[in-house]
Image: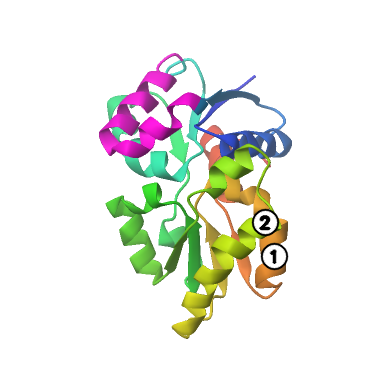
């Protein structure tokens, strides 16, 4: 049986692994979730790269595919890992415009992700507005995100966007945990706004990489 290791530092990786198991039941999914290193990885790209490599080293060469199910770590580490370990297949989450419809877009993410030049370039290419929701990942991990947090964190930010006469047609969820919020976000934005995460196209890329049918 083919083996796919899914790496993340939080609940978003668990959500992605669940979806991967459902979509590709012919593979064995190995979850590599390093919760304790999440804060350290946010401090500096070199720290993120070092800790990611340390976490993945036991699996490099021992699985058919490694998936970095984290936007910040994909941006920071994916190219480095591919160059250093050319015989191991790696994929990760991405906001590359060629994979995303170009339309008025809001990106929901965290500050740690926005600090990277690759994120800045992708957001600029999409002419997207960014809303950082830094306390949401931990709240989602603990099952404590409530409607009050939506009102306190998201509604004021959307008010500022509306004041600039920007009308979004697409919401990109650039944090794995935010996929858990899709039903509530749908209520906020309505059914005419497209909500996109990286789960579907990353699973499709995994299937192509391993030559599997979905």
Q: Residue visible at 55% across and 44% down?
A: 137
Q: Are marks 1 and 2 in contact (CB under 8 Å)?
A: yes
On the rendered structure, is 184 left or right of 173?
right
Q: Quadrant of residue 187?
A: bottom right
Q: CA distance from mark 1 to mark 2?
A: 6 Å
- Where residue 32 sits: x, y (%)? 53, 24
Q: Residue visible at 32% across and 37% down?
A: 43
Q: Is residue 39 visible?
A: yes
- Where residue 92 sits: x, y (%)? 46, 40
On the rendered structure, is 98 left or right of 153?
left
Which stretch did the figure color magenta?
A: 36-58
Disc 1: which residue: 186
Q: Is residue 211 visible?
A: no
Q: Which mark is residue 72?
A: none
> Is residue 103 depicted above or below 197 in this figure?
below
- Specify the quadrant that holds the C terminus: top right
Name the residue nearer the viewer: 98 or 177. 177
Disc 2: which residue: 182
Q: Secondary structure at mark 1?
A: helix
> Is residue 78 depicted above or below 165 in this figure?
above
Instruction: Determine if the magenta segment contains residue 201.
Output: no
Q: Residue visible at 50% across and 69% down?
A: 157
Name the residue nearer the viewer: 7 or 67. 7
């Amino acid at each position: 049986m083919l083996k796919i290791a899914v790496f993340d530092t939080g609940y978003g990786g668990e959500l992605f692994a669940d979806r991967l198991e459902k979509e590709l039941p012919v593979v064995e999914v190995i979850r590599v979730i390093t919760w304790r290193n999440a804060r350290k990885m946010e401090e500096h790209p070199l720290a993120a790269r070092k800790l990611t490599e340390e976490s993945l080293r036991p699996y490099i060469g021992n699985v058919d595919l490694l998936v970095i199910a984290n936007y910040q770590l994909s941006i920071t580490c994916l190219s480095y890992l591919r160059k250093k370990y050319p015989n191991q297949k790696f994929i990760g989450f991405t906001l590359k415009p060629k994979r995303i419809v170009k339309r008025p877009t809001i990106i929901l993410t965290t500050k740690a992700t926005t600090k990277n030049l690759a994120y800045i370039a992708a957001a600029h290419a999409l002419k997207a507005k960014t809303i950082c929701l830094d306390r949401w990942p931990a709240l989602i991990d603990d099952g404590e995100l409530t409607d009050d947090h939506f009102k306190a964190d998201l509604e004021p930010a959307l008010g500022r966007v509306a004041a600039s006469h920007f009308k979004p047609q697409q919401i990109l969820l650039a944090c794995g945990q935010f996929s858990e919020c899709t039903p509530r976000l749908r209520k906020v934005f309505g059914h005419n706004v497209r909500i996109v995460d990286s789960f579907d196209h990353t699973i499709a890329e995994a299937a192509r990489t391993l030559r599997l049918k979905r």
